[in-house]
Image (cartoon, grey):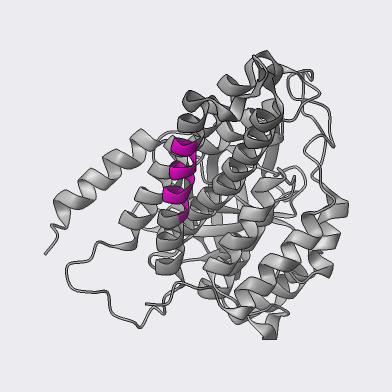
Amino acid sequence: MDFTFTEEQQAAVEAAKAVFSSVTPDSVPSPALTAGAVADDFDRALWRKLAEGDLLGLTLDPRHGGSGLDPLALCLVLRECGRVLARVPLLESSAAALAVQRYGGDELCAEVLPRAARGELVLTVAASGRTGHGPAELAVQARRNGEGWVLDGVQTAVPWAHGADRVLVPAHTGEGVTVLALVPRDHEGVALEEQISTSGERQAEVRLDGARLAYREVLTADGAWEWLRDLLTTGVCALTLGLGSAVLDLTSSYVSQREQFGFPLATFQAVAVQTADRYIDLRAMEATLCQAAWRLSLDEARPTASGALPIAGDVAVAKIWAAEGVRRVVQTAQHLHGGFGAVTDYPLHRYHAWGKQLELSLGSAAAHEEALGELLAAHPLG
């Protein structure tokens, strides 16, 4: 088996590193010192650079102005995004655009995808439901009328919603069917209520009250929401891996320079053992992430191996490792930094806040352990 990345995937990573090289986590006020959001909008200047580097249409077909790469390439870029805590909706916009490409009609694709690839149209996804617990698709009801669909309900904690142009909202029809509605942010019947995330970023509670959409703006294909949710969850794992890697690098640099009793902290066995354990966590996070992203990248026509779990199993394993691993990495970093880790002009506390946000996004480790257990019970391995 060949585990090396393709030339195209490696080129995407190098392009991402070049774009993110100028980004610093301290570019906005500290969430620890800010009562409200750290900023009103995401980093528009960085967004333009991502567009210029052809990274916003990474997974879109060339006919839509994209590069035609797979979800694994997107996850490799998201890892670099997480390293610097880049304040852009790269995951949400890319995932929503890819869902439109896979499940939307030609007219909607032509309207949305080229503009999304150029960075002119920003997309996000409502994936937390009404309270952050329970299936997100049950928080909004969609019903047909003579001219299209009507949406009613509430989605909470929608990331980057105030800066996005359209929100992809899962909804149920009352007949056991889930659809995805591409809702304009400033549409009649749509209202946004500001919420602040753990990381200090501006989110929104999106309220839909009789919002009317045309038929072409609603994706009705079977499995569309499940596929999108798996992609979003895997993308969160990629961001988490990048964040954890940056935290371990920060910690390694600190313990190599900080001295106690005339020796660097890194030479003490207890410190070396703890950092080695966290390195193992990161490698496990990387392996499970790549497995989930690889499964997402497989051609749909390719049969699943006999006895293999559905892709949801690989995604659950990746999220379990990401959630548990990043928590341990950040906690160890705070411990080894001592009081210096809480200084607000040092970036570690920002990584801590973002790490907690990502740990719980789209389900904690415990939630995915429960889901994995149910999956194993329903699909015994051969």
Return the residue found at the far front: 262
- Asked if 361 appears above or below 227 in the picture, the reply is above
In x, y percent, where is residue 329? 52, 33
Dividing the picture into quadrants, the one containing residue 112 is bottom right
Please give left or right for residue 282 compared with residue 36 in the image.
left
Q: Is residue 381 visible?
A: yes
Please give left or right for residue 38 compared with residue 207 in the image.
right
Residue 280 is inside the magenta segment? yes
Q: Is residue 206 visible?
A: no
Residue placed most toward the observer, 9 or 150: 9
What secondary structure characterizes most of the magenta part? helix
Quarter of the figure that contains the N terminus = bottom left
Quarter of the figure that contains the C terminus = bottom left
Return the residue found at the far bottom: 63
Number of numbered labels in the structure image:
0
Which residue is at a point 35% across and 37% down the rendered structure image?
A: 367
Residue placed most toward the observer, 7 or 377: 7
- Asked if 64 appears above or below 36 in the picture, the reply is below
Residue placed most toward the observer, 379 or 272: 272
In x, y percent, where is residue 310? 28, 62
Q: What range is drawn magenta here?
A: 276-286
Which residue is at a point 19% across and 51% down the rendered structure image?
A: 376
Please give left or right for residue 240 compared with residue 89 in the image.
left
Which residue is at a point 36% across and 58% down the rendered structure image?
A: 177
- Asked if 5 appears above or below 137 in the picture, the reply is below
Which residue is at a point 36% across and 83% down the rendered structure image?
A: 301
Residue placed most toward the observer, 55 or 248: 248
